[in-house]
Amino acid sequence: MRNFLKWQILPLIFLLIFPSYIFSFQKTTIKEILNDPDFYHQKVVKVIGKIKNLRLKVSRKGNPYTTFRLMDKTGNSLKVFIWEHQDLKEGDLVEVTGVFKRIKRVGIYTFFNEIEAERIKKISK
């Protein structure tokens, strides 16, 4: 019984002491990700850019989601996906935090170089 409790409590203590280790992100640029997508695949990244091709959509199951291209000043871009409709506008400067996926398959669809966002924060111009 003591071993069972020990193995249940130790992971919780670890998470409380080292949350930044588990939930850390890699602040980077769109260009750096595109130059080495294998390195960033499945990592949490934080990037800044302007919104282009903003789309508010609803899935076949009725779940709202938002997609757009995140573009840097030189024209490099990544696709961004986030669940729910977001209060965003075309051209907004934003900071996106999420998991970068070099390849993502959903049913019959395949997506390349996409960030599945956890957070999108508007930045003042």
Image (cartoon, rainbow, N blue to C red):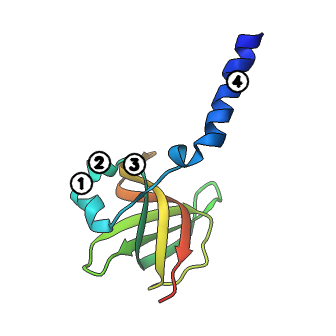
Which residue in the protein does label 4 denote? 8
Residue 93, percent across and down?
Answer: 46, 81
Does residue 1 appear to the left or right of 109 in the view shown? right
**SS state under label 3:** strand
Does residue 104 appear to the left or right of 5 in the view shown? left
Residue 115, percent across and down?
Answer: 43, 59
Residue 34 to residue 89: above or below: above
Report the disc number at residue 104.
Answer: 3
What whole-number distance in Å separates the C-alpha atoms at marks 4 and 3?
33 Å
For the question of whether residue 15 can be seen, the reply is: yes
Residue 3, percent across and down?
Answer: 70, 12
Please tell me whether mark 1 or mark 4 is closer to you in this view: 4
User: What is the three-letter code of the residue carrying label 3?
Assistant: Lys
| For the residues bearing labels 3 and 1, Cβ distance under 8 angstroms | no
**SS state under label 1:** loop
Q: Residue at x 39, y 72 (%)?
A: 70
Report the disc number at residue 39.
Answer: 2
Label 2 or label 4, whichever comes before in sequence order: 4
Label 3 or label 2, whichever comes before in sequence order: 2
What whole-number distance in Å separates the C-alpha atoms at marks 2 and 4?
33 Å
